[in-house]
Amino acid sequence: MTTSANQDNYPYQNQPTWSKSEKAIARTAFDAALGRELHELIQETKRMASQIRQFSDLWDLEHHLTRRRKEIDRKYDYRYSRLTHVLGRLLYEKRLSEQELGGLREDKLKSIRSFAKFLVEDVA
Amino acid sequence: MTTSANQDNYPYQNQPTWSKSEKAIARTAFDAALGRELHELIQETKRMASQIRQFSDLWDLEHHLTRRRKEIDRKYDYRYSRLTHVLGRLLYEKRLSEQELGGLREDKLKSIRSFAKFLVEDVA
């Protein structure tokens, strides 16, 4: 284990510090994206339920809800050590706009954009 | 381990044999009750989904479907060794009428009614 003055400012490697105002911006953007995704799932659930014709459609709906709940739980992880990746993914999925991140420091925006770009290329 | 001529007819204790026609009657009654219960659940699911207002209602619906699926899986156990209890429970829950069991031998009807009666008294 090594120690240095630098590690006092950055207790975990590659983990930027978030100012109070940045935390507020991130929280608002995060909550807005989560709210939109859940709202979408509500609409989807109402549509799937209204189209249930056979018994197997019931269990398809149940499994869909379970899968989406787990995905959403995994995706919306509000830990500062994860936040640039989380916001990067939401940007990539177009669940968040760059405007909503306005006010974050440039180093964070760069990390967020860079992870979004990585995901684009990963899929391509 | 003991053997006897009697055990050849009744390989498991207290397990009546089911004739071909009795099996057909039991299967029809069983499938009809299951179909009605699933149909009920479809209606209930459509109603619950149409009334979703908040995010927590989504997970309430998911948990309700999971719970009901497990209950139904447990309840509709079509093994001849279980069938008098299964049909007795369906009779007790009024998911099955005595008419639908017409044609079963009196020893089975007696076991089925007796288990239904036990459940009534168990709850009282």
Image: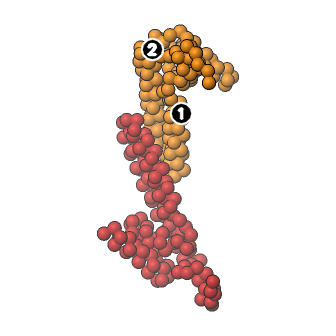
Chain colours: A red, B orange
Where is A17 relative to B32, above or below?
Answer: below
Mark 2 or 1, which is nearer the eye? 2
Quarter holding the C terminus of chain B is top right
Amino acid type of the residue that numbered disc 1 sits on in the rendered structure = Arg
Residue toward you, A83 or B76: B76
Amino acid type of the residue that numbered disc 2 sits on in the rendered structure = Ser
Where is A50 relative to A118, above or below?
Answer: above
Q: Residues within 10 Å of mark 1 (few under 14, many from 20)?
A: few
Quarter holding the N terminus of chain B is top right
| First in sequence: mark 2 vs mark 1 | 2
User: Could you say whether the residue bearing mark 1 is in a helix, strand or loop?
Assistant: helix
Quadrant hosting residue A13: bottom right
The residue under the point 46% across, 83% down is: A106
Chain where mark 2 sits: B
Chain where mark 1 sits: B
Q: Residues within 10 Å of mark 2 (few under 14, many from 20)?
A: few
The residue under the point 41% across, 18% down is: B24
Residue B74's tag is 1
The residue under the point 50% across, 26% down is: B79
Residue A116 drawn at (x, y percent): 40, 73
Look at the numbered discs 2 and 1 and tell me whether their residues touch, using CB distance below 8 Å. Answer: no
Disc 2 and disc 1: Cα gap in Å?
Answer: 25 Å
Instruction: Let me know if residue B28 appears in the view.
Output: yes
Instruction: Let me know if residue B84 appears in the view.
Output: no
Residue A122 drawn at (x, y percent): 35, 70
Where is A15 relative to B13, above or below?
Answer: below
Residue toward you, A114 or A43: A114
Q: Are marks 2 and 1 on the same chain?
A: yes
The residue sitting at the bottom extreme is A5
Residue A63 drawn at (x, y percent): 45, 47
**Residue ID for mark 2:** B19
Residue B18's tag is none
